[in-house]
Image: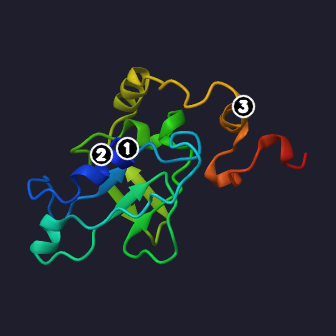
């Protein structure tokens, strides 16, 4: 579990990273509002420790986007994003996650009670911008599944 792009960047190549062939890597805080700006941060590299064990792919999940030149089993544009309390916001290290491409499902295996408990503990970060274009963007950008456009530009 990476709380941010910077945390992922700083620790992905650590030989002490506690991962194995069944690990699902999750990176939060990379969506339109959380980053902000929806940067191409979704390429979570394969951890060196796994590559050293001959593991060439694992599931990687983020609310970011990435370049079309990246590869592997990657779920992106998770929406609503973690930065506004979306589903990734409550994922913790050690949680079991199941991805089924055939069923088009991504499941976090926690109870509804645990989901409510974790959601209640979420703390909102201070906004990246409090004025100007940055504030306009944060106040009006839509989520990935709605196109990351300004809400006031959408047809009614």
Q: Are marks 1 and 2 in contact (CB under 8 Å)?
A: yes
Which residue lies at the image location 40% right of the left edge and 76% below the top edge?
71
Residue highlighted by disc 3 = 132
Which residue lies at the image location 69% right of the left edge and 26% below the top edge?
131
Number of numbered discs on residues:
3
Q: Nearer the viewer, residue 105 or 49?
A: 49
Which residue lies at the image location 51% right of the left edge and 70% below the top edge?
67
Q: In which quarter of the view is residue 57 placed?
A: bottom left
* CA gap, disc 2 and disc 3: 28 Å
The local crowd at label 3, few if under 14, some if 14 to 19, many if 20 or more residues have their Cα within 10 Å, is few
Rendered location of residue 78, percent (x, y): 51, 52
Q: Is residue 136 above or below residue 142?
A: above
Mark in front: 2 vs 3: 3
Rendered location of residue 63, percent (x, y): 49, 51
Q: Nearer the viewer, residue 63 or 102?
A: 63
On the rendered structure, is 150 left or right of 126? Answer: right
On the rendered structure, is 122 left or right of 37? Answer: left
- For the C terminus, the quadrant is top right
Residue highlighted by disc 2 = 7
């Amino acid at each position: 579990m990476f709380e941010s792009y910077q945390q992922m960047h700083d620790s992905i190549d650590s030989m002490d990273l506690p991962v194995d062939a069944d690990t699902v890597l999750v990176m939060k805080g990379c969506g339109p509002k959380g980053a902000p700006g929806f940067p191409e941060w979704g390429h979570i590299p394969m951890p060196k420790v796994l590559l050293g064990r001959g593991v060439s792919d694992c599931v990687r999940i983020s609310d970011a986007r990435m370049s079309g030149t990246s590869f592997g089993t990657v779920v992106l544009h998770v929406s609503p994003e973690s930065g506004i309390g979306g589903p990734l916001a409550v994922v913790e290290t050690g949680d079991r996650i199941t991805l089924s491409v055939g069923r088009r499902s991504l499941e976090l295996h926690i109870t509804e009670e645990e989901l409510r408990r974790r959601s209640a503990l979420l703390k909102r970060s201070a906004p990246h911008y409090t004025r100007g274009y940055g504030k306009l963007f944060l106040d009006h950008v839509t989520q990935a599944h709605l196109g990351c456009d300004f809400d006031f530009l959408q047809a009614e």
